[in-house]
Amino acid sequence: MSVLDTAKARSSVREYTGQAVEEDKLRKILEIAHVAPTAANMQPARLVVVRSEKGLSAVSKAANIYGAPIAIVVCADKSKAWTRPFDGMVTTDIDASILTDHMMLMATELGLGSVWICYFKPDVLKQGLNLPRNLEPVNILALGYSAEPEADIDRHAQTRIPMDELVQYK
């Protein structure tokens, strides 16, 4: 499958079968996060893979993970961030987002579903997972086998803004 085909096939999955995700698939998802680029190669992202019943219960108190058997909490280590010198913009959220996007695409390629979750209670998540102070949760990636029908790969023509509105040439 090409990268474009994988991106077209990816959709936000909010219902999972409960089937366990194989270790080799999880390793590939984590490996693609490992090779993802970050600003100035500072690599400030940290991943907390949650799949125990206790851990998933803790995450579920902070966010709806839709019954996914795995939740990857994508965190930013603010002490390792690259900061743009001209305006002080810190790139940790961008770096974490790049890793998350890579993981979603790999999950799709491996036949898994995922959903990127930003609607969560950070304080509840940090406490429930006993995260160290330097780690700030940016998002949660729920992973598992989808219980939903496959998304129409041609849906973007109706669900996205027109290309000429997205792209400008100067």
Image (tube, grey):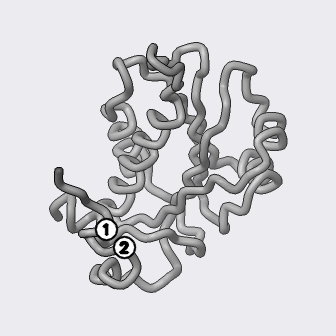
User: Which one is in front in this view, the residue at disc 2 or the one at disc 1?
Assistant: 1
Q: In this view, does 25 lie to the left or right of 15?
A: left
The CA distance from mark 2 to mark 1 is 6 Å
At 30% from the left and 81% from the top, the residue drawn is 157
The residue closer to the viewer here, 72 or 145, is 72
Q: Is residue 132 left or right of residue 145?
A: right
Q: Which residue lies furthest to the front in this view?
A: 170
Percent coordinates x, y for residue 109 in the rendering: 29, 61
At 53% from the left and 19% from the top, the residue drawn is 88
Q: How crowded is mark 1: few (under 14 residues within 10 Å), some or many (20 or more)?
A: few
Task: Name the mark on residue 161.
Answer: 2
Up the image or down, 140 lies above or below 39; here it is below
Q: Is residue 81 left or right of residue 40?
A: right
At 33% from the left and 40% from the top, the residue drawn is 32
Percent coordinates x, y for residue 61 in the rendering: 82, 54
Label 2 residue SS: loop
Q: Examine the image and state in which quarter residue 160 appears.
A: bottom left
Up the image or down, 46 lies above or below 101; here it is above
Q: How crowded is mark 2: few (under 14 residues within 10 Å), some or many (20 or more)?
A: few
Q: How many marks?
A: 2
Q: In this view, does 77 lie to the left or right of 43?
A: right
> What amino acid does circle 2 point to?
Ile
At 52% from the left and 25% from the top, the residue drawn is 89
Task: Name the mark on residue 36.
Answer: none
Q: Examine the image and state in which quarter residue 136 appears.
A: top right
Up the image or down, 43 lies above or below 24; here it is above
> What amino acid does circle 1 point to?
Glu
Label 1 residue SS: helix
Query: Which residue is under mark 1?
Result: 165
Percent coordinates x, y for residue 53 in the rendering: 73, 52
The residue closer to the viewer here, 76 or 69, is 76
**Would you say the residues marked 2 and 1 are in contact, meaning their CB atoms lie under 8 Å apart?**
yes
